[in-house]
Image (tube, rainbow, N blue to C red):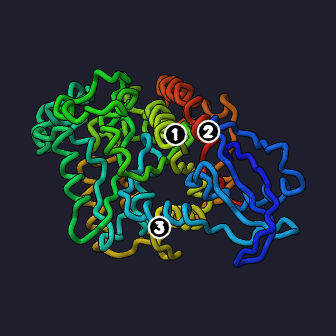
Amino acid sequence: MPNLRCSTLLNSQTEPHGSGQTTYLERDLSHSNTDSWDENADTASDSARNICSSLSFAYSSLPVRWPVRLDKTGQLIYTVKKERSQQMADMSNKSIFVITHTRSCSTAFERTQIFMTRRDILTFFHEPFGDAFYYGPEKVSLAHLRWPAGKLEKSGRTHSTYDLVLQSILTATKDPNKKRVFLKDMSYHIISPIHSLNARPESLQQLFLSDDDRLNPTILPTSILRDFTFVFLIRKPEAAIPSLHRCCIPPLSKQTDEYMLDPTELGYRELRILFDYLCQANKEPPILIDAHDLLHDPHAIIESLCTHLSLPYSPEMLEWPDKDDHDFAESLFQKYAGYHEDALHSKGLGPKPRDELQASKSKEEGNAEWEKKYGQEATEVIRGAVEMCREDYEYLRRHRMVPKG
């Protein structure tokens, strides 16, 4: 949980729900990982701690200063305030941008009925900036240098500039049917792996005209970033990196045409850069989910996320048996064949035991397991990538939505 301060004021005015204490939960934008409390909080501190605990799912969308009401015993009376209601109303109209790193379980996340199967209320984009990143005339990735001859041309996306991709998304945001836009993409698709502001695509240069863009690390203007509600999804590198390695060896490599881990396309550092920038630009952290929590308690995480995004929730969202939904997913995922096989052929997202997910292993135990599966040389590559990503993952994880209990 982020650092929250609690200051308590006695209030004797008559209120609709009775008199009591007006308590303000204030976000400390330094993002400390420990709780601290205003020295004037007095006896309400414990109650405020309980409130923060009960709000553990919702902390990331709290305003910087959020009033709540306590009765004389310190119990929560109500938490509705005009500015909070307006914030939720504004969020309900915003487009949704799920941003992640490689192999984060994001495809299974997309397949939930909160997103991919709700085509009645959402217009869906699956990794659209990857078209420009890998295939277009402004391509940033060097993957084409190691791909088989003809793969670029066969993709049908060699015309995809960043501006063309962006305009297709912006056009969808103006849909007369009032559908919200949902898009999911990789952090390194919108933040150059060289982390330079001079690396912005030529087709978008004319959009960076505002002083707000001076520190913007992405290829998207700040004015456009503000039109999205961002949802970050992360996964511990000890799980994500070996999963990526599987895509670079047979049988999956025959579909992916990749035979090596590219350290510039992992995405943890770019996620951290973007997270810090959005915290600074928006004065509050975006929503952040750890795949570990999602897989352990998908119902709680998805229900909470629906609340954040003002989307309807039902437990059936975690199942997708419909053939039409499968065909739609397959049509989107085919441009990255070999990377989405597990999620594509799944029927739902069920909870996994926490002890199975944690499976805390020492470095030596992990190396021994990978060496048995992939060999010594591959283990050295995997371990190197894991260690490169670990600090950024741990940093981001401190800001995740924490499941109750």
- Contact between marks 1 and 2 (CB within 8 A): the answer is yes
The label nearer to you, 2 versus 3, is: 2
- Mark 1 or mark 2, which has the lower sequence index? 2
Within 10 Å of disc 3 (Cα), the crowding (few <14, some 14-19, many 20+) is some
* Residue 371 position by quadrant: top right
Tag 2, which secondary structure? Answer: loop
Of residues 246 and 321, the one nearer the viewer is 321
The amino acid at mark 2 is: Leu
- Residue 102 percent across, percent down from the top left: 42, 40
- Contact between marks 1 and 3 (CB within 8 A): the answer is no
The residue under the point 72% across, 74% down is 15
The residue under the point 88% across, 68% down is 73
Label 1, label 3: how far apart the Cα atoms are? 21 Å
Of residues 234 and 80, the one nearer the viewer is 80
Mark 2 lies on residue: 29
Left or right: where 337 falls relative to 203: right
Tag 3, which secondary structure? Answer: loop
The amino acid at mark 1 is: Cys
Within 10 Å of disc 2 (Cα), the crowding (few <14, some 14-19, many 20+) is some
Asked whether residue 242 appears in the rendered view, the answer is no
Mark 1 lies on residue: 279
